[in-house]
Amino acid sequence: MQALLFILFGGLAIGCALAVVAQRNPLYNAISLVGVFISLACLYVMLAAPFIAAVQVIVYAGAIMVLVVFVIMLLNVEQEERGRGRLKFLVPTAVALAAVLIAEVAFILVSVQEFPAGASSDIGLTHSIGTALFTRYLLPFEITSILLLMAIVGAMTLARRGGLLSPNARVIPGAQTLPRSLVDPKAAPDDLHAVEAESTEEAARLLDVVDLSSRSRRDE
Amino acid sequence: MDTAIDIVLKFVAITVVFVVVLMVVAYTVLAERRVLGFIQGRLGPNRVGYGGILQPFADLLKFILKEDIVPDKSTRFIYFLAPVIATMAALMTMIVYPFGPETRIPFTSISIPLVVARFDIGLLYVLGITSIGVYGIMLAGWSSNNKYSLMGGLRSSAQMISYELALGLSLIGVIMLAGTLDLAQIVDQQSGWNGLRWLIIFQPLGFIIYMIAAIAETNRVPFDLPEAETELVAGFHTEYSAMKFALFFLAEYINMFTVAMLATTLFLGGWNVPFADSIFGRGTFLFGLVSAIGFLLKVVFILFLYIWLRGTLPRFRFDQLMNFGWKILLPLALLNIFLTATVIFLVS
């Protein structure tokens, strides 16, 4: 029974992983990757590590891949542009890295044969992971969270470029751009000065429009 | 041999749970239409059977017999896959909820727990499966090759990612108080004191945050922007018809049922009914029956709350929705964790 399930989920994981590489449509790639993550989670359950399995599904399949699919849908990338010259060098690199990986696996299979008998059986359970994270590995845990926070703040500062747009500026699809005529009642209708902003108030501030308050009152 | 019997028993249990859940869901749809009718001063469907009691089956028959239209330029495989993912993810969470206590079957000495599967990480399992459900809606929106569907799919994924955070964080207070992720144990800890140990008393803020985030997670009014009919036709399921549409419809109502059951299990004491154990005695058949009925009644009450909200509130605007989720609900959930941790630290 165990062997049967292992073959089923292992095969599913490998099949999905091959599909990730072989498919040409980016959305199919992403869905295949979700399949890989879910099959891996099933394998973790079989290895008696239910917490890791659940986190694998929640974090990878449920959050990160949703974002990836979201971006693919937002940009609506239809087909990968094939045969781009500047990526050609990646093919021999990939082959070399794959060889290294296979050699590594072979080395481990040859050198480590005995399963350590005295290994404690509560590895991967919620309680043991929690205790370890918040006592023995507290410092690395906190450092990792600060690192993640810094990454988020960095991404925000890089992505948020409010301000006046030049006439041929390229705008991220989905970003909100507001022309002056929208926030300034006295502007000429063909005034094409535009800013990227979160709200009309912010746009008014960036464009130095003063009597926005009178306008918004009129709208209501 | 024993494992074979076990597997057969599990299949039977799953079938029973699915049938019960689908029946309740079918009648939730009817109840929604009748209650909305009452709120809006009209009758609602009351012609099929006595007082409309057979309306769900008439609806089902209609869904099956309608023509199934597939848009010409859709991505066929994903177009077919999306409703399946949505329904499957909605149904898969059903198996972990404890519907009642250990109950002795009448005239025998066998006791069975009224839960299909019980494991260490029940709560995380529910959250994980729920987070898979968003793919159904996203892929439906993308594969239909329709701009309204795409907009609906994008909106729903943005909304569900945002509110999943607040939902997960609002449950951490419960986990901290209970010290376990096993739903059956959480319910056990809430028994006694005739209802005064229900976690809603210790986690009022957590309960409110959970209820709001749960409504957003299930795309219900006032957070039903993914299918806002005044601007997006019908959102992600614009191009779906017949049974495929019915599957999405089903998934939405099962999800409502799921979040109502989770709220009952975590905050409203699960199957615990005040004074039931002193009247009937633990472990008897009547106690099990009363507990299971009590559980269902609590769930039905939350479902009624949902329908009531739908009849009362208008829809949010999209930027209001995002601001509310990230700037109000998420900090409140963090505050709730902080308060709970402080109280636990001071008490112990």
Image (cartoon, rainbow, N blue to C red):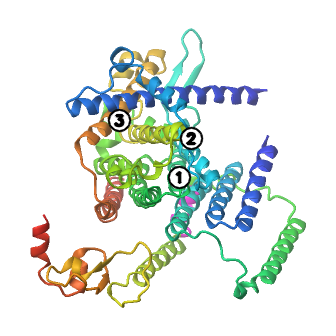
The residue positioned 70% from the left and 88% from the top of the image is: A86
Q: Secondary structure at mark 1?
A: helix
- Name the kind of residue labelled 3 in the image: Leu
Q: Residues within 10 Å of mark 2 (few under 14, many from 20)?
A: some
Q: Viewer-proximal residue, B90 or B313?
A: B313
> Would you identify the image quadrant in which residue A184 lies?
bottom left
Read off the chain for label 3: B
The label on residue B303 is 3
Indicate the quadrant containing the C terminus of chain A: top left, top right, bottom left or bottom right: bottom left
Q: Is residue A130 magenta?
A: yes
Q: Give above or below for A31 relative to B252.
A: below
- Pinpoint residue B189: horizontal percent, then vertical percent: 42, 38
Q: Secondary structure at mark 3?
A: helix
Read off the chain for label 1: B
The CA distance from mark 2 to mark 1 is 20 Å
Which tag, 1 or 3, sits closer to the chain's start?
1
Q: Viewer-proximal residue, B63 or B134?
A: B63
- Give left or right: position of B309 versus B120: left
Which tag, 2 or 1, sits closer to the chain's start?
2
Residue position marked by numbered label 2 in the rendering? B92
Q: Residue furthest right?
A: A110
Q: Magenta residues?
A: A127-137
* Of labels 2 and 1, the one closer to you: 1
The residue positioned 63% from the left and 67% from the top of the image is: A26
* Of labels 1 and 3, the one closer to you: 1
The CA distance from mark 1 to mark 3 is 26 Å
Residue position marked by numbered label 1 in the rendering? B140
Q: Viewer-proximal residue, B84 or A55?
A: B84
Q: Give above or below for A190 relative to A39.
A: below
The residue positioned 72% from the left and 87% from the top of the image is: A85
